Structure formats: C-alpha cells, structure tokens
C-alpha cells in the first residue's frame, strides 16, 4: 500500500465516521420534528417515498394476480370490507375527510380517486406500511378476501356515491377469515343485518369497530385533560348520557351540567382498563369498557367502573350517540 493511497483511504474513513457522528448528534439533539402535523422536509419526503415505492415494487413483482379480478362477485364481496375497514382513512365516493384521514401523516390517498397496480395494492393491504397509519391486514384477513378488496379497488374510482352504497349494501357486509391463522374451521361470515353481534370465539375488538374505539379513547383522553371543546366535538348533538341513575338528553345538557364535574373527577386520576369489547355493524358501533379508576382528587378513592358507548358514523366520522356509565367503590 503506497503512502498516497493510504492517506486517501484514511481521509475517506474519517469523513464517514464524522458524517455518522454528525447524524447521531442530530438525532440525539431532538431537533428533528417527529410530529404528524408538520410535513417532512422535501429531501426527506423524497427519500422516504423512494424507499417505500421501490420496496413495494420489488415485493409486488413476484405476486401472481388472479385472472378473474374483474368478476362482479369479487367486486361486490370486497365492497363491504372496504367500507368497514378502509373507508375511515381512505374515504369513499360522497364521503368527506374524516378525523382519522385528516390527522394522519403521510396522508392516506383517496382510493376512490387513484388507480393502483393490483399486485402492489395486494402487497400493501396484506403487509401494511411501516411508520405510517397503514395496517397489515394480512394479520387478520385471508388472501382471497384481500384479493376481493383489490378487485373492488379496481372498480372504486369509477363509482358515484349511489353506486358505492349499493355495492356495499349488496356485499353481505364485513366478512373475512382469520388470515395468517389459516383455516381453523371457523370462518366468520358476518351478514349485513346481524353482523357479528355475539360471535363466540370472535375477536374482542371487531376490526370494523377500530375507528369507533379510537373515538372512545380520544373522548376519555379529552375529558381527563379537561378539553371540553374536544369532548363536545365527539358527541352527537342528540347524545343520551345515562349516569348514576340519571339521564342527560342532549350534548348541550351534558356540556352544561356534568361534563365539567366528570372532567374534574378524572383530572389526575389513574385509569386502568381491565376489559374491552367492541363491535360494529354498518354505521353503528358499540364499545364496552371496564376499568379501575384511582382518583386523587379531594377525596382519594378507587372505583370499578363500566362504560358502554354507542357510536354512529355520519359522513365518515364516528360520533357518540349514547353513553352509559356506572361505578362502584373498590377496584378489581
Ligand atoms: C388507519 C388508517 C388506514 C386504514 C384503516 C387503511 N389504510 Fe391504507 N393507507 C393508510 C396510509 C396512511 C397510507 C399511506 C402510507 C404511505 O404513503 O406511506 C395507506 C396506503 C395504502 C395503499 C397504497 C396506496 C398507494 O398509493 O400506493 C393501499 C393500496 C391501501 N392503503 C389500501 C388499504 C386497504 C385495502 C385498506 C382496508 C383493508 C386500508 N388501506 C386501510 C392508512 C390506512
């Protein structure tokens, strides 16, 4: 190794080490904004998009697309699952932005306005996309159901609101098997009418109810934070609140009376959830939550609390239409 070559090599290594150290120092400084409400800078956006697009393309290339993807049956079956599992984020014809779609970064594309390569759509629907809101549906759905949804995505950009609702209504609602758990002999087929109100052995949280559950959690968080404007936003104007044997029959009545006291009670309280089930059928969802509340207020106490919330979806957003709270002293 001659001296010049050695110098060049050492300089390169030193530069690389310095660059890595600078990167680490930048990461540790906390200066990079990780909040979802401010976009990445242009170079970072371009880099992340390039990693995502190339990764998806490389993996989708090996996927064989079924020949009958444009069959009416596949499209109709996919419609119900799209409406139940994808529309809260990706929206649908005649549906405006939802709280979820507005808050996510990167923003979920409107799948009623773009055509996506079927193999790529299948891969993304099955595996999801890291560090974005896009879930891996393959963990709960079998390939055939995913392909039906991809078939529906092919037809979606051509649908108007009326045709969309018609297909969803004809689809038999939200139905799928257990995906990677394989065929374990119980294939939950949920009809549009009875859905899976009581599915022995079914999941505690129906995937179709996930967005409603998010609203229930956001409501609890807003109440505990004393964010009464946030509390109000999540309640339907005609909400019925049943609490301690009494009833409040509208959002205004609840906001004027109990909301403040409930917020004050929860302030600084420690809430531990002990059980939850959630179900959805069409535009209705119901979420039952049991928890233990340690309140540190004027009078420290521990309560076992149970809550039922009923939510209705209007224009793509879930709102609470009924609440029932009850509690008794002593936790579980
Ligand atoms: C909680 C929100 C959320 C839900 C629910 C959701 N997605 Fe996504 N999806 C996203 C986000 C966010 C992206 C964009 C990710 C990115 O660009 O990195 C995305 C991206 C996609 C893409 C890639 C689009 C493209 O331009 O290549 C497809 C296809 C997709 N989703 C399909 C689905 C399907 C099918 C469902 C329902 C089974 C679904 N998504 C449910 C949030 C969601």
Image (cartoon, helix red, strand yellow):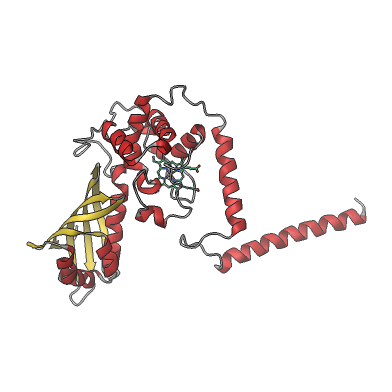
Tell me if I can see residue 307 in this picture.
no
Spot the residue most to the bottom: 298
Q: Please count the marks in the image.
A: 0
**Residue drawn 39% across the image and 30% down it:** 148
From the top left corner, tell me how far across and down residue 32 is, in percent: 55, 65
In this picture, residue 79 sits left or right of residue 290: right
From the top left corner, tell me how far across and down residue 163 is, in percent: 32, 36
From the top left corner, tell me how far across and down residue 168 is, in percent: 30, 36
- Out of 183 and 55, give the one closest to the viewer: 55
In the displayed structure, 290 sits above or below 200; it is below
In this picture, residue 87 sits left or right of residue 312: right
From the top left corner, tell me how far across and down residue 123 is, in percent: 49, 36
Spot the residue most to the top: 67
In the displayed structure, 133 sits above or below 297; it is above
In the displayed structure, 100 sits above or below 57; it is below
Where, by quadrant of the figure, is residue 155 drawn? Answer: top left
Tell me if I can see residue 50 in this picture.
yes
**Residue drawn 52% across the image and 29% down it:** 63
**Residue drawn 51% across the image and 34% down it:** 117
**Residue drawn 44% across the image and 49% down it:** 108
Quadrant placement of the C terminus: bottom left
Where, by quadrant of the figure, is residue 92 drawn? Answer: top left
Ligand 1's quadrant: top left
- Out of 170 and 12, give the one closest to the viewer: 170
In the displayed structure, 294 sits above or below 47; it is below
- Out of 314 and 209, give the one closest to the viewer: 314
In this picture, residue 251 sits left or right of residue 216: left
């Amino acid at each position: 190794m001659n001296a010049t070559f050695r110098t060049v090599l050492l300089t390169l290594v030193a530069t690389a080490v310095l660059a890595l150290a600078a990167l680490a120092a930048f990461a540790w400084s906390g200066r990079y904004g990780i909040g979802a409400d401010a976009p990445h800078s242009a170079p970072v956006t371009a880099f992340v998009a390039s990693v995502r697009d190339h990764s998806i393309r490389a993996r989708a290339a090996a996927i064989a697309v079924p020949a009958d993807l444009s069959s009416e049956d596949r499209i109709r079956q996919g419609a119900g699952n799209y409406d139940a599992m994808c529309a809260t984020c990706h929206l649908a014809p005649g549906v405006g932005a939802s709280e979820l779609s507005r808050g996510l970064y990167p923003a979920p594309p409107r799948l009623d306005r773009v055509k996506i390569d079927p193999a790529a759509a299948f891969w993304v629907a099955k595996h999801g996309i890291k560090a974005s809101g896009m879930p891996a549906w393959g963990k709960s759905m079998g390939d055939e159901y995913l392909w039906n949804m991809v078939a529906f995505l092919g037809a979606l950009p051509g649908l108007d609101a009326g045709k969309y609702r018609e297909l969803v209504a004809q689809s038999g609602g939200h139905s799928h098997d257990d995906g990677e758990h394989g065929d374990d002999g119980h294939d939950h087929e949920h009809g549009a009418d009875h859905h899976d109100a009581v599915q022995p052995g079914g999941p505690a949280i129906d995937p179709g109810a996930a967005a409603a559950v998010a609203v229930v959690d956001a409501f609890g968080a807003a109440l505990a934070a004393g964010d009464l404007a946030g509390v109000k936003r999540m309640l339907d104007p005609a909400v019925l609140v049943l609490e301690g044997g009494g009833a409040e029959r509208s959002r205004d009545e609840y906001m004027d009376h109990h909301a403040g006291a409930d917020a004050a009670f929860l302030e600084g309280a420690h809430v531990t959830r002990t059980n939850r089930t959630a179900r959805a059928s069409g535009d209705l969802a119901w979420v039952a939550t049991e928890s233990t509340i340690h309140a540190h207020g004027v009078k420290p106490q521990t309560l076992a609390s149970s809550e039922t919330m009923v939510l209705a979806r209007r224009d793509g957003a879930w709102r609470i239409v009924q609440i029932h709270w009850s509690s008794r002293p002593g936790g579980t």
